[in-house]
Amino acid sequence: MEGIVSSKQQQPLVFAYYVTGHGFGHATRVVEVVRHLILEGHTVHVVTAAPDFVYTSAIQSPRLFLRKELLDCGAVQCDALTVDRIASLEKYSETAVIPRETILATEVKWLQSIKADLVVSDVVPVACRAAADAGIRSVCCTNFSVQKASNVSVEQVRKELGVEEDVKLVIFNFGGQVCGGSDKEEYPPNFIKLPKDAYTPDVIAASDCMLGTLTETHYHGGVEMIRRDLLTGCWQPYLERAIRLKPCYDGGVNGGEVAARILQDTALGKNHASDKPCGARRLRDAIVLGYQLQRVNNRIIGIPDWYNLEENKLVGRSSEGSQFLREVEDFEILHGDPQGLPDIMAFLKSLADIGAGHDSKKDTDDKVREDLAAAGLFNWEEEIFVARAPGRLDVLGGIADYSGSLVLQMPIREACHVAVQKNHPSKQKLWKHAQARHHADHEKLAPILEIVSLGSELNNRGPTFDMDLSDFKDGEKPISYEAARKYFAKDPSQKWAAYVAGTIVVLMTELGVCFENSISILVENHVVGAPCGVMDQMTSACGEANKLLAMVCQPAEVLGVVDIPSHVRFWGIDSGLRHSVGGSDYGSVRIGTYMGRKIIKSTAAGLSKGNNKDDMDKDGIELLNNEASLDYLCNLPPHRYEGVYVDKLPETVTGEEFIKKYVNHEDSVTTIDPKHIYAVKAPTRHPVYENFRVEAFKALLSATASDGQLSALGELMYQCHYSYGACGLGSDGTDRLVELVQEMQHSKASKSENGTLYGAKITGGGSGGTVCVIGKNFVGSNEQILEIQRRYHVATGFKPYVFEGSSPGAGKFGYLKIRRRNATE
């Protein structure tokens, strides 16, 4: 930092400094800037949610005013490293979106009352809008790089801590310069709990090494540690390597002073940006894109126009692959056939671009972390294997799968792509944190697994994953599946890796494969991202283009494929509401379904042994005995459900009441909450009738082509949709899309053309997600689908992605073996 000589102004300025409520880190770093503004003779009003001591422990001045307000909640975190996206959006809506107009009116009045010369935001978006409305200049100042000098000597700090000079000292710190751990925690004997008012720069200067976030460690130079090792206490190899590093920062440590002078100049009009509506007015919310992606609690809400700035950029992203229809000349295809699939050609183009980035040896500013990691993943002169697996559209069956229903699933055009390469450990390229982990045992060459996930920024997942393949061994045997689940659960941001690396465990366990080489995997998955069950995986593996995979989920019997008639077409329309099969609604419905099955089994057992037993024939008793041992609800015909059992099922029951009478619900996947009230009748009815609907749908597909055939197919889909809703698995977005399909179906224009669209339904686990639509296979139907997309966009502010077309499953596609061509070829 450059040296600055203080020169107090003739007329003191008034600063309104807004600080985000995300932890203490921002507040503690703001202190240095505020302290120097006050030293220059200015008055500073800080709007903050942090405790007073964060500021008053470093600043004692009558020109410091603290106003307790939470105008930006920041990210809600499960822990110091994990962001809860949905909770963050809900909290942000509650804090800053719903009361926005009231906040603006209050802040404008307050800013005018204190006669502020400049509004500084770190970074509270609404503060910029309030400043603009009040006619006051504003500036955003985030201060991750503000450096602070220590106040006392290293010797004095170590003496106060009781640490000898020859003892290695590590400071463990997350989230700014507020020290001190929890009073409820017990610490190992070699841990020292710092007082909350300890001056962190002093402790940092006296330490040999710091373990913390990049914000606190960057100017000393450091070693990157993966979260899994941090959370499990595997610190030693990283610390040993970090201690050997020499500090690489040789700049000044007067960052607070420099920032204060810049803010002072800005308040006076120096270096001030123009008043064009592109600065403060374009910064109205930092969470625009995330809010559009996730929404709030599966509700359609009125999104202001200023939330739509990034929309077109987002919507167009997942369809970029269609432009790469030409042959990719960068690779020689040694095995397999791309089959002219645009997504495969696009993936090969991505690989070529990544390889070119590796050749350039330049880390440009526009490269994101995953691109840098991917560029160094492969030995580009060696063979690479490429595979693809499509997503699937749930045409009919959905949540009835766990009740043993027949399901009909279509593999879609969009797919997940994987590039894999194996290398001898001596040729494996290690990322920096992996180098640190292997530093203590560098002479032993052990095979490792490295994975890069492209598109991670759209799904809030960690872009990289790596591990020693020996972690999958328990002595000479593979670890158990339960141990593998616990392993991948150590770091929430990398749980996605279980879907990729988990295949290694399966191959070791089921086929006895021994992995002696290191494995590098590149995964590209922009669309297919939800947790999935067996019908999803079977469709992705065994599906065929333009056909429906028919499977009876007892547990996974593939009946074959069903031809989609040439006059029939299916589309998927994304509602923009993220559903999760791990959600509470889905789990409650599943529990209610299994409760219903248990009640039916108990009722059947009672009837087979009851007073009327003598009036029954042998076949009747045998039927009741079979129903008393019912494995799957879908094996119960609708007429038996209606004639014998429907009156025995309660609409709802508390978990406590059910357990008291029936002990358990015989489902190893879910757990009953005694205090929860579960719906029973609707979740039990759904799979019984859904299985019947799917069987009828399958039979109708082979019927003579007619409007009557299409109307009947569409009606079955509508019935399925409303049955989801009765179970509590509907959503405003999917209901709106189905209503738009019905509007199109019953419009005069559609009737005059003998109809185009005939039915629609929610898919998968429900509570959001995609709607499946059935219609005639001709251009008029496509036009109506686009009109539905337009109307939904106008009504909700979200432009839904339309899934159309089909592609072969992983088995039909096979794999490609490719090798990069030399530049001279």
Image: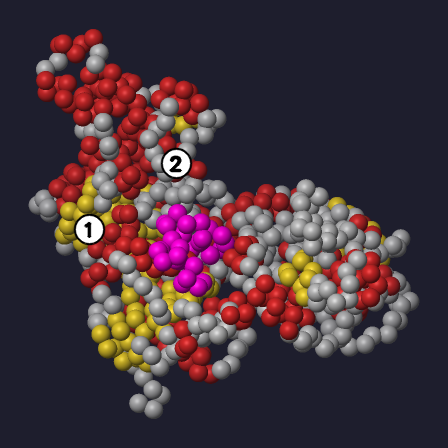
Query: In which image quadrant can residue 313 be found?
Result: bottom left
- Assign the C terminus to one quadrant of the image: bottom left
**Left or right, 518 with reference to 87:** left
Q: Nearer the viewer, residue 358 or 38?
A: 358
Q: Is residue 235 left or right of residue 205?
A: left
In the rendered structure, which amino acid carries the disc numbered 1? Leu
Q: Position of residue 219 (x, y in %)?
A: 68, 70
Question: Circle 2 sits in a helix, a strand or a loop, which is it?
Answer: loop
The disc at residue 548 is 1
Residue at screen point 34% across, 49% down: 532
Query: Can the viewer see residue 96 in this picture?
Result: yes
Q: Which residue is more in the foreground, 386 or 435?
A: 435
Residue span colored magenta: 467-496
Q: Amino acid at mark 2?
A: Thr
Q: Is residue 638 visible?
A: no
Give how far across and how far down residue 16 sits, in percent.
Answer: 77, 56
Whether residue 364 appears in magenta in the rendering, the answer is no
Tell me which residue sits at (50%, 73%) in the image.
442
Foreground pick, 477 / 564: 477
Relative to 641, residue 316 above or below: below
Say the numbered circle drawn on residue 670: 2
> Which label was assigned to residue 107?
none
